[in-house]
Image (tube, rainbow, N blue to C red):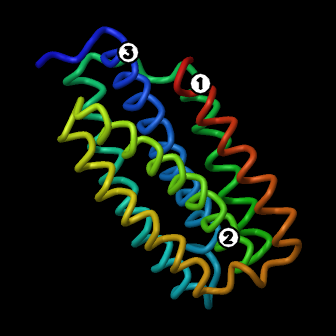
Amino acid sequence: MQPSQHMKTRLAEMIRVDHAGEHGAVRIYDGQLAVFGKIKGMEKTAELVRHMAEQEQEHLDHFDKLIVDRDVRPTALGPLWNVAGFALGAASALIGEKAAMACTAAVETEIDAHYASQMEELAETEADEALLAAIEKFRAEEAEHKQTAIDEGAEDAPAYQMMTKVIRFGCRAAISISEKL
């Protein structure tokens, strides 16, 4: 059964926002690596970030392909998210390892909720089993990133509560905007 026009529009919104989010995640890790990759003694942190960045790149590659294969317009705000993601990653890393991990934990908290909502919607409608399977896999990896960040001291970051509230608010705003624009 073919999805309704409404569901086709909704699937395009999901792909657009997930593509934007994965692009933003890659750029956050790029910013963190730009800092940690240059500081002696930060090799362990750089390796952790590099591992998460590689997984995010796999997610982005998947959504890059979906954007093309399904003829979905990417977000018009891609250039903004490109700069903002890198700046957030670099700024959090400049504050320190725990702040970078707090950034990761905050972002992944919002992505987990976002992907959970999409999974529920896709499961209810049975509109796109392949997209549902990809989101399930990516959500599990994002949860792993969050746990890694917590294990590495995210909650011990300076001004952790304030920092995570601001980052989570920014993520929710970016999600809402990127679905439509």
**Dot 3 lies on which element?**
helix
First-in-chain label (1 vs 2):
1
Few, some or many residues within 10 Å of mark 3 (<14, 14–19, 20+):
few
Mark on residue 171? none
Q: Are marks 1 and 2 in contact (CB under 8 Å)?
A: no
Tell which tag, 1 or 3, sits nearer the viewer: 3
Tag nearer the camera, 3 or 2: 3
Query: Split into 4 quadrants, where in the image is the C terminus?
Result: top right
Question: Left or right of 16: which side holds 1?
Answer: left
Q: Which sits earlier in the primary sequence, circle 3 or circle 2?
A: 3
Q: Is residue 17 above or below residue 33?
A: above
**Residue farthest top in this picture:** 5
Mark 2 secondary-structure assignment: helix
Amino acid identity at mark 1: Leu
Task: Point out residue 64 in the picture as x, y percentages from the top left corner.
Answer: 31, 35
Q: Earlier in the sequence, mark 1 or mark 3?
A: 3
Q: Is residue 14 visible?
A: yes
Tell me the distance, in whole angstroms, between the alpha carbons under discs 3 and 2: 36 Å
Circle 1 residue: 77
Q: Label 3: which residue?
A: 9
Mark 1 lies on a secondary structure that is loop
Q: CA distance from mark 1 to mark 3?
A: 19 Å
Task: Give the quadrant of the N terminus.
Answer: top left
- Locate residue 50, reporting x and y percent: 44, 70
Q: Which residue of the protein is positioned furthest toward the front in this rendering?
A: 124
Q: Position of residue 92 (x, y in %)?
A: 73, 64
Q: Is residue 97 in sight in this rendering?
A: no
Q: Which residue extends farthest left?
A: 1
Name the residue beneath numbered marker 2. Answer: 100
